[in-house]
Image: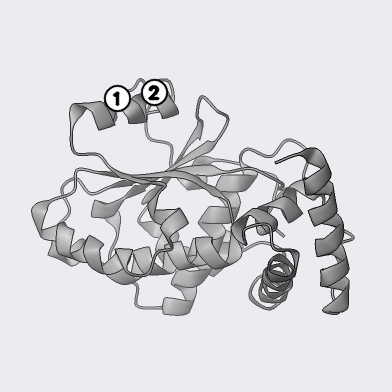
Amino acid sequence: MERAQEELALTQIRKSVEKLGSSTESYGDPTLMRFLIARAMDPEKAAKMFVQWRQWRAAFVPLGYIPDSEVPDELESRKICLQGLSKNGFPVMIVKGRNHFPAKDQLQFKKFVVHLLDKTLASSSKDGEIGSEKLIGIFDLQHISYKNVDARVLITGFQFLQAYYPERLAKFYLLHMPLFFVAVWKLVSRFLEKATLEKIVIVSNEEERLQLMREVGEDVLPEEYGGKSKFVAMQDVVINPLAVEG
């Protein structure tokens, strides 16, 4: 898209947001472009999405971030790892499926989804504002059993990405998918938008494994996946709490 068209769309979305009684004053062009891209460059639809996002953040994340103290049960399993930046500068998040068990507290789990997405994106921020950063997700299903299966966790995570984190997902890899999980994934897929599905790779052969290696980089991938690094639990990664999505 030509820069002139982008500038026009950005001007239009700012005006549309104001008509809806909100403001874009604190947000740069990269943030607004994400909403425009997510709504096929339609300024009015993008403005509506932006305003709904601001309202949701204000109600659900009043501090601007979710502190560790609000998600203790989910953090205890150490199931999320932040591995650093991919070759393209995207933060790499790994979910260890075998360490996950269906949540008893659904509100805490939803807060945890926001906590991990915000922290993953903030881990790549250089200037404080989260603008156009994307993330790479890896969901490792190795050694999972039926007690780890939780379709709701995937549905919730992807729905949050689609509704509140537009254009944040660069790629999502599913590793070591067991046969019994195929039916679960088919169920989850029904809740995903086409644009999201196009970013998901089920690693099932050597070429797909090499694609993962090329995109992420062996210095970032853990040794368990053929890389050179160790797993880094999310709790052990220190970030600026002000460098978050909102």
Considering the image in quadrants, where does the N terminus appear? top right
Question: Do the residues bearing badges 1 and 2 touch, measured as CB atoms within 8 Å?
Answer: yes
Q: Give me the residue at 72% from left, 48% from top.
A: 243
Quadrant of residue 40 in the image?
bottom right
Q: Is residue 120 visible?
A: yes
**Residue at (79%, 39%) from the top-left corner?**
3
In the foreground, 26 or 227:
26
Marks 1/2: CA–CA distance: 6 Å
Badge 2: how crowded within 10 Å, few (<14), some, or many (20+)? Answer: few
Identify which residue, 55 or 33, lies in the foreground. 33
Residue 90 vertical position relative to residue 76 in the rendered view, above or below: above
Amino acid type at circle 2 is: Arg
Q: Which residue is mark 2?
A: 214
Image-based side of 201 in relation to 237, left or right: left
Under tag 1, what secondary structure?
helix
Looking at the rendered structure, the kind of residue marked 1 is Leu
Image: 18 above or below 34: below
Quadrant of the image occupied by residue 19: bottom right
| Residue at 37% across, 69% down | 191
What number is the disc on residue 210? 1
Say how the picture is coloured: one colour
Position of residue 199 in the picture relative to residue 189 (left or right): right
